[in-house]
C-alpha cells in the first residue's frame, strides 16, 4: 500500500500566521493608543464624560490585550509548524517519488523471479538470482522511501505537538473565564445605560416591545453621553445651560421621561421590610440601584403613554384670572399668565423633583439633571411655559424671565 | 471654566479605529477557521480553531463593547468640538452671558 503523504498546506499556514500576527500587532497598537488616550483623558479631561470614557476603555483594555497576546503567540507557534510542514512535505514528496519508482520495479522483479524459478529451462532458472537481486534492491529502495516518509510524518507530528502545546497553553490565558465576561457585560451595561434597562424589560416581562421602548434603547448610549456632557456643564457649572442643550440635542424621544421618572422614583416596598428608626436609615431605604430606577422610569413612561395614566397634578396650582375683553389687554394678560404659569411649572417640574430626587441619593440627582438637559430645560421658565402652552392654545410669544418677549427656543418636556 | 485639552479629532480617530477592530476580529476568526484544514490532521488544527473561536461570546461582547466605545469616542469627539466652540465663543467678544 502506498504510504500517505503529509497533509496540509504550509503556504496557507504561513498566511494564517501572518494574518494572526498582523491582527495581534493591530490589537497591540490599539491597546497602546487606548491606554495613551485614556491616560491623557484621565489627566486632562477632568469631567464625568472623560471619566466615563476612561472607565469604558479600561474595561475593554485587558480583554483586547489578552486577545492581542493570544493572536501574536498563535502566530509565533504557527510559523515553525509551517516550516516543519514545508520540510516534511518536501521530504515526504521525495520519498513517495522514490517509492513510486521502486515499488513497480520490485513487483516486476518479484514476478520475473517467480517465473524463472517455476520454469523448466535451466537458462531461465539461472536468471532468477539476478531478478532476486533486483527485487531486493528495489525492496530496499521502497522500504527506505517508506522510512523517509515516516520520518517526515514524525517531523511534522513533533512540530504539530509543539504547536498544539503552545496553542493549548493559550487556551488557559483566562480569556474565556467568567471575569472577562463579567467585565464586558458591565462595560456594555454601563455604556448602554437606558438601553440595558429596556433589555431588562424585554419580551421576558409583562411589558410588550414597543417602538418607543426601542427608541429608548437606541438612545441609551446617546443618553449616557448626553448625561455625561450635561453633568460636565450643567452639574458642575450650573449656568452653562447652552452647552448642555447643545450636547443634549444628541438624544431625543422619551428617554428624558424615563430618566426623570426613574430619578424621582421611590422605593415604598423597602419601607415595609422593617420600621426605620432614623432619618438616615429612611434615606438609605429609599435609595434604589440605578438600573432599578431605569426600570421604574420605563414602567412609568409606559403607563403614561400606553394606558394614559395621568401624571399627578402640580402641587402648586396657578390661579387663573379672567382674560380681559379688549385685544391690547389680552396681550398683556397672556404675558402675565404665561410668566406666572411658567414659574409655577418650573417650581413643580424642577424644584419639587429636585427635592424628591435629592432624597434618592446622588444617582437619582444625576439622572434628574440628565433628564432636565435631555428635556431641553436649559431655560426652565421658557421650557415650563412651552409645556403649559403645548396643545392647549395656539403658539404665541412667551414672557422670559426678564419680562421680555421671546419665541420658545426648545420643545417642552415629554411628560 | 472647564479646561478641555484632549484633542476631539484624536478621540474620534481612535473611535473609528476601535470600531473597525471589532469587524477585523470577526473576519479574522471566520477566516482562520475556514483555513485551518491547512494544518493537517494533527492536534494543532482543532486547538487553533479553539484559540480563535472558543471566546466567541467574549468576542461578540468585545465587538459590541468596542463598537460602543468607538461610537461614544466619535460622538464625544464631535460633542466636545461643539463644546469647545461654545467655550471659545463665550470667551470671545460676542460670547453669551455665562
Image (cartoon, grey):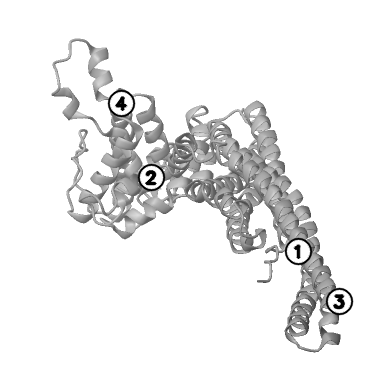
Dot in front, 4 or 1: 1
Query: Where, by quadrant of the figure, is residue A264 drawn?
Result: top left
**Dot 3: within a 10 Å radius of its alpha carbon, few (fewer than 14), some, or many (20 or more) residues?**
some
Q: CA distance from mark 3 to mark 1?
A: 20 Å
Q: Which residue is labeled 4 in the image?
A: A360
Q: CA distance from mark 2 to mark 3?
A: 87 Å
Dot in front, 2 or 3: 3
Q: Secondary structure at mark 1?
A: helix
Q: Check chain identity for marks 3 and 1: say if they share one.
A: yes
* Residue A140 locus on image (x, y percent): 80, 65
Camera-side residue: A362 or B62?
A: B62
Q: Is residue A175 left or right of residue A271?
A: right
Q: Which residue is labeled 3 in the image?
A: A130
Whether pointer 4 and pointer 3 mark residues with C-beta atoms closer than 8 Å, the reply is: no
Camera-side residue: A83 or B98?
A: A83
Give the residue displayed 68% in from the left and 31% down from the top: A40
* Residue B87 locus on image (x, y percent): 64, 37
Dot in front, 4 or 3: 3
First-in-chain label (4 vs 3): 3
* Residue A68 locus on image (x, y percent): 65, 43
Whether pointer 4 and pointer 1 mark residues with C-beta atoms closer than 8 Å, the reply is: no
Subunit of label 4: A
Subunit of label 3: A
Q: CA distance from mark 1 to mark 2?
A: 68 Å
**Dot 1: within a 10 Å radius of its alpha carbon, few (fewer than 14), some, or many (20 or more) residues?**
some
Q: Which mark is residue A196?
A: 2
Amino acid at each position: 500500500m502506498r504510504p500517505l503523504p503529509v497533509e496540509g498546506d504550509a503556504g496557507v499556514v504561513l498566511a494564517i500566521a501572518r494574518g494572526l500576527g498582523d491582527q495581534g500587532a493591530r490589537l497591540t497598537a490599539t491597546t497602546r493608543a487606548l491606554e495613551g488616550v485614556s491616560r491623557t483623558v484621565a489627566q486632562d479631561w477632568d469631567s464625568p464624560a472623560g471619566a466615563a470614557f476612561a472607565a469604558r476603555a479600561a474595561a475593554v483594555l485587558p480583554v483586547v490585550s489578552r486577545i492581542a497576546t493570544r493572536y501574536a503567540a498563535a502566530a509565533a507557534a504557527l510559523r515553525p509548524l509551517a516550516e516543519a510542514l514545508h520540510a516534511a512535505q518536501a521530504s515526504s514528496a521525495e520519498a513517495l517519488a522514490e517509492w513510486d519508482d521502486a515499488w513497480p520495479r520490485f513487483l516486476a522483479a518479484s514476478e520475473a523471479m517467480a517465473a524463472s524459478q517455476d520454469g523448466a529451462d535451466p537458462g531461465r532458472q539461472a536468471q532468477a538470482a539476478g531478478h532476486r537481486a533486483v527485487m531486493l534492491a528495489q525492496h530496499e529502495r521502497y522500504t527506505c522511501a517508506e522510512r523517509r516518509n515516516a520520518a517526515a510524518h514524525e517531523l511534522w507530528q513533533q512540530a504539530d505537538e509543539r504547536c498544539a502545546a503552545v496553542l493549548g497553553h493559550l487556551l488557559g490565558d483566562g480569556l474565556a473565564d467568567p471575569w472577562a465576561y463579567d467585565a464586558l457585560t458591565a462595560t456594555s451595561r454601563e455604556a448602554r445605560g437606558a438601553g440595558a434597562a429596556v433589555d431588562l424589560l424585554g419580551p421576558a416581562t409583562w411589558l410588550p416591545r414597543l417602538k418607543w421602548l426601542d427608541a429608548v434603547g437606541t438612545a441609551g448610549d446617546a443618553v449616557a453621553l448626553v448625561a455625561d456632557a450635561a453633568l460636565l456643564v450643567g452639574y458642575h457649572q450650573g449656568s452653562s445651560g447652552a452647552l448642555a442643550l447643545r450636547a443634549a440635542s444628541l438624544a431625543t424621544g422619551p428617554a428624558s421621561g424615563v430618566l426623570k421618572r426613574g430619578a424621582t422614583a421611590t422605593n415604598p416596598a423597602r419601607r415595609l421590610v422593617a420600621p426605620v428608626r432614623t432619618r438616615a436609615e429612611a434615606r438609605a431605604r429609599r435609595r434604589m440601584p440605578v438600573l432599578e430606577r431605569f426600570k421604574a422610569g420605563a414602567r412609568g413612561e409606559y403607563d403614561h403613554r400606553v394606558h394614559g395614566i395621568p401624571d399627578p397634578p402640580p402641587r402648586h396650582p396657578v390661579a387663573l384670572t379672567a382674560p380681559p375683553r379688549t385685544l391690547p389687554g389680552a396681550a398683556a394678560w397672556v404675558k402675565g399668565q404665561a410668566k406666572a404659569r411658567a414659574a409655577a411649572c418650573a417650581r413643580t417640574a424642577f424644584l419639587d423633583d429636585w427635592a424628591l430626587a435629592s432624597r434618592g441619593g446622588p444617582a437619582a440627582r444625576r439622572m434628574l439633571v440628565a433628564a432636565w438637559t435631555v428635556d431641553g430645560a436649559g431655560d426652565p421658565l421658557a421650557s415650563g411655559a412651552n409645556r403649559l402652552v403645548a396643545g392647549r392654545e395656539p403658539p404665541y410669544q412667551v414672557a422670559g424671565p426678564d419680562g421680555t418677549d421671546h419665541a420658545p427656543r426648545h420643545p417642552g418636556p415629554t411628560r | 471654566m472647564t479646561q478641555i485639552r484632549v484633542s476631539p479629532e484624536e478621540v474620534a480617530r481612535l473611535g473609528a479605529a476601535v470600531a473597525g477592530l471589532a469587524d477585523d476580529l470577526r473576519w479574522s476568526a471566520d477566516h482562520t477557521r475556514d483555513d485551518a484544514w491547512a494544518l493537517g490532521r494533527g492536534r494543532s488544527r482543532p486547538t487553533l480553531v479553539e484559540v480563535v473561536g472558543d471566546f466567541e461570546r467574549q468576542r461578540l461582547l468585545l465587538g459590541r463593547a468596542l463598537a460602543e466605545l468607538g461610537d461614544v469616542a466619535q460622538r464625544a469627539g464631535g460633542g466636545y468640538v461643539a463644546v469647545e466652540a461654545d467655550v471659545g465663543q463665550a470667551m470671545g467678544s460676542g460670547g453669551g452671558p455665562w
